[in-house]
């Protein structure tokens, strides 16, 4: 039976990434160092080509796509944009703890919350999953057997925690800027269980310092982002 492959790639580094800020809906470009890193990574040939290309509408993803796949004409998918952190955009967890009593209270309570003027974890997950499922359905219907998606860290973690095999938690799918995962979808298994096999990391054969450092997230930032994005079980309950 024909299988389908989808390559999920996180955008390159922005200034906000370098500063440890909450950057979701803020439309930042790539930092010069981020663009250069992508060019260096692409020279190794570790990014597979595909029949179709999809991209978040935000500038950092469109710039990443143009560097890694200069000849591609990507389809922009609104549902693949990053979570909107509202009033927390552009600030670090440390700054918010000092400046925003609601953030500090939220952190202390252990409860999930929606950033002021932002997007709840449940809404974010529903949006991302809806967009991904439609994309897969379109691939199966058109017999497009391979695709590249350039999107955001939160989007990739949401997709893989919801559909990825082996099953793993949201933060188990952390990946560095310019890195990602390759999925294999078998139509019968997808129709029956809506799961996809995660069979490789991207770029192929590359272990970047950025990816390693990203996995050493300090507890405060990790906890804050977990609540901001929400966990799969909580989102399914509408919490």
Image: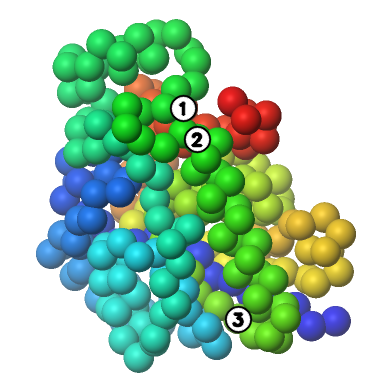
Q: Residue furthest front?
A: 117
Give the quadrant of the C terminus.
top right
Numbered badge on residue 201: none
Can you see residue 201?
Answer: no
Which residue is identified by label 3? 146
Query: What residue is shown at x 65% (from left), y 62% (from top)?
Result: 133
Q: Which label's residue is closer to the chain start, 3 or 1?
A: 3
User: How far, Cα to Cα, is label 1 from label 2?
Assistant: 7 Å
Which residue is identified by label 2? 121
Q: Residue furthest left?
A: 32
Question: By what rule are the colours in the image chosen?
Answer: rainbow
Q: Nearer the viewer, mark 1 or mark 2?
A: 2
* Residue 220, quarter of the rendered image: top left
Which residue is identified by label 1? 227
Q: Which label's residue is closer to the chain start, 1 or 2?
A: 2
Query: What residue is shown at x 55% (from left), y 44% (from top)?
Result: 125
Can you see residue 229?
Answer: yes
């Amino acid at each position: 039976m024909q299988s389908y492959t989808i390559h999920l790639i996180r955008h390159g580094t922005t200034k906000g990434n370098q500063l440890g800020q909450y950057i979701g809906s803020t439309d930042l470009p790539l930092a010069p160092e981020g663009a250069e890193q992508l060019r260096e990574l692409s020279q190794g040939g570790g990014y597979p080509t595909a029949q179709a290309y999809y991209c978040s509408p935000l500038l950092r993803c469109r710039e990443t796509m143009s560097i890694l796949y200069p000849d591609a004409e990507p389809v922009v998918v609104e549902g693949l944009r990053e979570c909107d952190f509202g009033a927390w955009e552009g600030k670090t967890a440390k700054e918010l703890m000092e400046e925003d009593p609601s953030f500090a209270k939220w952190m202390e309570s252990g409860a999930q919350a929606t950033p002021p003027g932002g997007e709840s974890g449940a809404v974010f997950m529903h949006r991302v999953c809806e967009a991904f499922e439609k994309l897969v359905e379109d691939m199966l219907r058109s017999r497009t057997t391979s695709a590249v998606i350039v999107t955001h860290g939160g989007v990739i973690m949401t997709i893989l925690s919801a559909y990825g095999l082996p099953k793993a938690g949201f933060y188990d799918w952390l990946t560095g800027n310019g890195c990602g995962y390759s999925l294999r979808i078998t139509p019968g298994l997808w129709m029956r269980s809506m799961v996809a096999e995660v069979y490789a990391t991207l770029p192929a054969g590359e272990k970047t310092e950025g990816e390693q450092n990203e996995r050493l997230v300090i507890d405060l930032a990790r906890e804050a982002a977990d609540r901001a994005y929400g966990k799969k079980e909580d989102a399914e309950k509408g919490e």
